[in-house]
Image (cartoon, grey):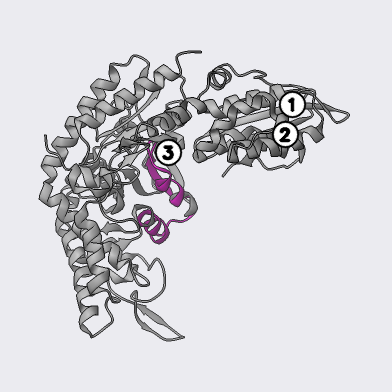
Amino acid sequence: MMNYKNDFPILSQKIHGKPLVYLDSSASSQKPACVIDAITNYYKNDHANVHRGVYELSQRATRAYENTRQHIKEFINAAHTHEIIFTRGATEGINLVANCFGIKPADEVIVSAMEHHSNIVPWQLAGAVLKVIPISDAGELDLDQYKKLFSTKTKIVSVSHASNVLGTINPLKEIVEIAHQHQVPVLADGAQAFPHLSVDVRVLDVDFYVFSSHKAYGPTGVGVLYGKEKLLNQMPPYQGGGDMIESVTFEKTTWNKLPFKFEAGTPNIGGVIGFDAALYYLQNAGMEKIVQHEKKLLDYATQQLSSIPEIKIIGAARNKLGVISFVLNDIHPHDIGTILDHHGIAVRAGHHCAMPLMQRFNVPACVRVSFGVYNTIEDVDVLMKGLRVVQEMFSHV
Amino acid sequence: MSELRELYQEMIIDHGRHPRNFGVLSDANYKKEGFNPLCGDKIIVYMNEKNGIIQELCFEGCGCAISMASASLMTEVLKGKSLKDVEQLFSAFHQLVTENKLSDILGKLTVLGGVSEFPARVKCAILAWHTLKAALANDSNAVSTE
């Protein structure tokens, strides 16, 4: 099996005297040395504002920034580079579309029961009525019910490509086909899926696709909104400021063209350049190999966790990412999280920003382990040892 | 490991799993809901007070072993105490779980001293107390520890 752990400096440390086992990549991934170096190098040697200066440094910064846009275009196979909009993260991408897509009160937006709060609340703020695709006990979308949710008021479908709690990979291509039969566009929240799957926006034919750098081995504070040119051109700007304008007078201002229309103010240049290095890291490792590696971890961990009868795994979709949520008897996830932490193991305990989903499965909270490229079979073994200590501590009373 | 054993002492796991005074007090003259949005812990505290003395105190809710044990022990310790005692115990308890500062008045609440080594868990231990204080202050908003 491949071992990528040494590429990530943070993972060589000890926590509470034990080697760190990081199992919370769905919340945020760790960064390989090449990403950290790219950011350091940029600030040491190449920093200036972009799209402004005639001098060498600004041109270097602009080139690196715009090369990343081109890189992302190729990475997700978009038709045009100007369809790649830099944001602060997946959340801002969804907010941008929710704000600028012309949602009027009583317009309907179709979401699913497994959405992260960030794909629920922006639509509510925009005044939309949410129609919710139900999910099965296994954690899969009910596509028959989905087809029945369309009405003349349906403005857009907004669903996650993969669930941050259940790990379910949704059949995005099919979801898009159904929506397009109703002439309704689709936004996919790719925050979870992007670093773990090959994403081809043209094969998917998805209209908007958002993702975050920090979950894909890049720095925090950077994300991408991909949108089809035609739709982006129809939308008004999101925020006003520098870069997004063509000309300004006190009487009238005209907008810059895509993608700059949606990028007001000095962007996170260093973050974007760091993200570029993360994309190269993914490419050098090879997406196919990464998918296989994480599938092995998922299968092994599922089998190991299932061997403890007191553990109940939430989410048994046929098509899953390396994400496993579970409950262990009536032991609260926070207690499990604290005990595992003392064994060097970082897991997420809580409602995972998906309260409606927790209600659906009737648990107030659960423990989640999620894998990144750097995890190993040994990490799963350490987790299992930690869980046996948890059981032991709670077995006396 | 010793810090962990200190945190998860037998009495805490016992109270966490089998909380005392757990249930609804239908004729309560004080009632308050407390919520920790970060982890989803939720409790409702019910109290009957007469002439400045706590006659009945109970709670219901769900949460981690620390928050449930803390609520359970709080109800045990405060029953029969005066509202003035509540003030004193609250500040002593707060110092216990944040600074591990011991005080004679704490009695069996001292068992929660291990929480001070776990800053992320202080809000679990203090939720019931904040909720009770808000009930006494007659604060109309639900309590949140965030």
Mark 3 element type: loop
Image position of A311 (left or right of B142):
left
Frontmost residue, A252 versus A320? A320
Amino acid type, mark 1: Leu
Q: Are marks 1 and 2 in contact (CB under 8 Å)?
A: yes
**Distance of mark 3 from mark 2, alpha carbons?**
37 Å
Q: Which residue is mark 1?
A: B78
Discs 3/2, front? 2
Q: Which residue is mark 3?
A: A354
Visible residue check, residue A201: yes
The answer to whether tags 3 and 2 share a subunit is no
**Distance of mark 1 from mark 3, alpha carbons?**
36 Å
Amino acid type, mark 3: Ala
The residue at the far right in this view is: B51
Q: Quadrant of the C terminus of chain B?
A: top right
Q: Quadrant of the N terminus of chain B?
A: top left
Image coordinates of residue B144 in percent, x first then y, are 60, 41
Amino acid type, mark 2: Leu
Mark 1 element type: helix
Q: Is residue B35 above or below residue A60?
A: above
Frontmost residue, A145 versus A386? A386
Image coordinates of residue B116 in percent, x first then y, are 55, 37
Q: Which mark is residue B89?
A: 2
Image coordinates of residue A19 in percent, x first then y, are 29, 36
**Distance of mark 1 from mark 2, alpha carbons?**
9 Å
Q: Is residue A352 above or below residue B58?
A: below
The answer to whether tags 1 and 2 share a subunit is yes
Image coordinates of residue A192 in percent, x first then y, are 29, 43
Image position of A238 (left or right of A47):
right
Disc 2 crowd rating (10 Å Cα; few below 14, some 14-19, many 20+) is: many
